[in-house]
Amino acid sequence: MLLETLLKQEEDQDLDEGAWNLAMAGGTCLGLVARTVGDDIVPLVMPFVEENITKSEWRQREAATYAFGSILEGPSADKLAPLVNVALGFMLSALMKDPSNHVKDTTAWTLGRIFEFLHGSALETPPIITGENCQQILTVLLHSMKDVPNVAEKACGALYFLAQGYVDAGSASPLSPFFQDIVQNLLMVTHRDDAGESRLRTAAYETLNEVVRCSTEETAPIVMQLVPVIMVELHQTLEAEKLSTDEREKRSELQGLLCGCLQVIIQKLGGMESTKYSFLQYADQMMDLFLKVFACRNATVHEEAMLAIGALAYAAGPNFAKYMTQFYQYLEMGLQNFEEYQVCAITVGVVGDLCRALEDKILPFCDGIMTQLLKDLSSNQLHRSVKPPIFSCFGDIALAIGEDFEKYLIYAMPMLQSAADLSAHTTATDDEMLDYTNQLRNGILEAYSGILQGFKSSPKTQLLMPFAPHIIQFLDALYNGKDMDDTVMKTAIGVLGDLADTLGVHAGPLINQSTSSQAFLEECLASDDPLVKESADWARIAVSRAVSG
C-alpha cells in the first residue's frame, strides 16, 4: 500500500519547497518503517524498485527512486552495500540524462542519502566510492549544479555528504585532485541569477563550508585563495544604500552566508601551523568587515558575524586584544539581546573564546561583561537555555584572569549556590526537564572548576574557603540523586579534584566529612566512559594529597 502511494506525485511538487502530498507522506512513512524494522524492509521494497526504475512513465521511475532512497537509513550497510554498488552507475546516468526533472531531483536526493549513510571511514563494509568511480561521481554532481535550481540544490546536498565522508581521511583525501574545480563550481552556483530559488545559494555555501571543513593540508593554498574572494563579496554587500525592507533582508541573509563561510575558513587555516601565520595577515581586514556588518544592525547577521569573530579570536590569540575596544560595544549588545536569545547564547560562547584567546588581557573588559552576565542570570525574560552557558562563562573568565576574579566572588558565588541548590533538588518530570537540569548542573560545575583552577597557586586561595562546604554538599547531593549523565559525572568528579588541588590540606577535613566523596570517586574510577575514568584518576591523586596532608 505504501509503495502505491509513491505513484501519486503532483506535477509541480519538485518546484514547491513546502510541498506535501500523498507520495511524499508515503515516502516519509516508508523511511520510518525502514528505520524501525531494518534489514527486513529491503526484500519488500526492492521488487517495486526493480520493476519501475526503467519504465517509460516518469511517475514510475521517480517512485522507484524515491522508494530506494527512503530505505537507506535503518538497514545494515552489509545488506545495502551490494544494492547500492549496482544502483550507483544507473543513478549517475539518470541524473545526467533522465528527461524528467522530477526524476533528476529525487535521484540527486537519493545519491545524497547514499553518501550520508553508506560512505565514510566509520563503516566496516568496503567503500562504495573508490578511486575508479570518484571522478565520475564528481563530474556528474558538478554538471548537475548547472541544472534547474531544485536539481542543482539536491546535487549540492549530495556533494555535501560526499565531502563529509572524507572528514577523517587524513592527508590523502580522494577529493584533493578535484578541489579547485569543486570550489569554483560552487562559487559559480552562488552567483547564478536564479540562486534565490529552492534555497540554492544557501545550499551552495553550506556545501562549500563542508568541503573546506573536510579539506586537507594539501589543498590549504586553494582555501587561502578563497579568503580575499569571500571578503570582496562581503565588502560588496556593504556598499548598497537606500534598500527596501525586502532588499535589506536579502542582504542580511547573504552577509550571514558569507560570514559563515569565513568562519569555517578561519577555523581551517587558523588551526594549521602551516597556514596560521600567513592567514592572519587578513585579520585586520576581516575584523573591519565584521564590524561594518554589525553596524548594519541586523540580528541574523549579528549571529554569523559573532561566530566568525569568535573563530578569529581563537586563531589570533593574544593579538586579538587590539580589536577589543571597537568590538566591545557589539559584544555588549549581543549579551543584552534577550529577545533573540540565540544571539545572546552565541555571544556568551564568544566571551569564552575571547577568554581563551586573550587570557588576562581581557581584564579591562571584565567589569562590563560580568555586570551584563549577572543581569542576564537575574532576568526572567531571558530564555532558560542561555543560563547554563553563562555559568560556564564565569569559569572561563576566572581561568583567564585568575585571582583578579576576587571582586566578582561576592556576586557570582551566591548565584551559583542558589542555582546549585535548585538543580540538585529538582525532580525531573520528563526527559526534556532532566536534560536541562543536567545542562544547568554542568554549567555550574564548570564555573566552580574554572574559579578553583583560576585561584590555584595564588596567595588568595583562602578567599574560596567559605564556599568550599557548599561545593562539597552540591557534589554529595548530585551523587545521591543518581540522575547525572556522564558529562555531569565527569565535570563533578573534576571539581572534587580541583577543590582538593587548589585548597590542598584545607580541603582534607571537608572531603573526609563528605557523605559520598569516596563512593563517588570509586564509582567514577570504575566507569566505562574513558573521560570519566581519566577525570577520576586525576581527582584521586589530588584528593589523597589533600587528605593525607
Image (cartoon, rainbow, N blue to C red):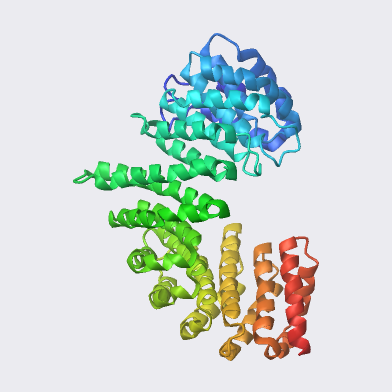
Residue placed furthest toward the left: 242
The percent coordinates of residue 447 (x first, y second) are 56, 74
Please give the name of the residue rendered at 78% of the width and 60% of the height, measured from the top-left corner.
528
- Say if 460 sits above or below 230 in the image: below
* Front-lying residue, 318 or 30: 318
Residue 298 visible in this rendered orientation of the protein: no
> Measured along the vertical axis of the image, is residue 298 above or below residue 366?
above
Q: Position of residue 461 (x, y in %)?
A: 59, 88
State which quarter of the image contains the N terminus.
top right
In the displayed image of the protein, which residue is found farthest to the top? 56
Q: In front here: 332 or 484?
A: 332
Q: Quadrant of the C terminus?
A: bottom right
> Residue 221: x, y in percent?
51, 43
Q: Residue at x 36, y 54 (%)?
A: 285
Q: How many marks?
A: 0
From the top left corner, tell me how far across and down residue 361 is, in percent: 45, 74
- Residue under the point 69% across and 87% down: 504
| For residue 253, above or below residue 91 | below
Q: Is residue 242 visible?
A: yes
**Residue, x 42% and y 39% (percent of image)?**
202
Which quadrant of the view contains residue 477? bottom right
In the visual, does 107 lie left or right of 329? Answer: right
Vertical order, 235 against 344 (above or below): above
